[in-house]
Image (tube, grey):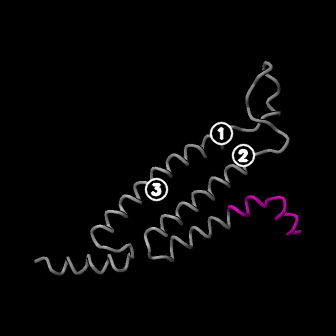
Amino acid sequence: MFEEFFWNNRIQCVAVVLFAVGFVTLLLHRNLLKKVIGLNIMDTAAYLFLTSLGYISGRTAPIITDGAPAMEKYVNPLPAGLVLTGIVVSVSVTAVMLSLSLRLYRRYHTLNLDDIYQEIHREQEREP
């Protein structure tokens, strides 16, 4: 029973495992670059999940060439549009995160969050 369920939903299961890997990476690592990579893995898992839900075997892309045949022959284009929009947003978010990480590295000479927190705490103690 489980094997049949897993085989029929293997792409969704892979997406869930990828999301879990990215989530654990985001939570457990203290390095900012590893956190950025974890968030990108989570994004990729979400896009894979959406794409797999939008795909229906035996159907084609919704490009009408011979008039307007029955809509049952086409897949839904909405998940593909959502994934494309999400990819554009995630590239922008990744660029901002990497630029902020670069600024933090230039200021504190480390990307370890514990070291950055300690340095910020020391700076606040020095201020009157």
Query: Considering the numbered disc 2 on the image, is that residue within a helix, a strand or a loop?
Result: helix
Evaluate if marks 3 and 1 touch, with contact meaning CB atoms under 8 Å apart. no
Evaluate if marks 2 and 1 touch, with contact meaning CB atoms under 8 Å apart. yes
Are there few (<14), some (14-19), or many (20+) residues within 10 Å of tag 3?
Answer: some
The residue identified by callout 2 is: 54
Q: Quadrant of residue 32?
A: bottom left
Measuring 48% from the left and 64% from the top, which residue is drawn there?
36
- Image side of residue 94 versus residue 113, left or right: right
Which label lies toward us, 2 or 3? 3
Q: Name the kind of residue labelled 2 in the image.
A: Gly
Between 21 and 101, the residue placed more toward the observer is: 101
Q: CA distance from mark 3 to mark 1?
A: 24 Å
Query: Considering the numbered disc 3 on the image, is that residue within a helix, a strand or a loop?
Result: helix
Task: Determine if the magenta segment contains residue 112.
Answer: no
Reading the chain from its start, which is encountered first: label 2 or label 1? Answer: 2
Which dot marks residue 78? Answer: 1
| Magenta residue span | 1-15
- Image side of residue 39 versus residue 20, left or right: left
Where residue 21 sits: x, y (%)?
A: 61, 70
Looking at the picture, does residue 122 appear above or below residue 66?
Answer: below
Q: Name the kind of residue labelled 1 in the image.
A: Leu
Which dot marks residue 94? Answer: 3
Q: In this view, which residue lies farthest toward the left?
A: 128
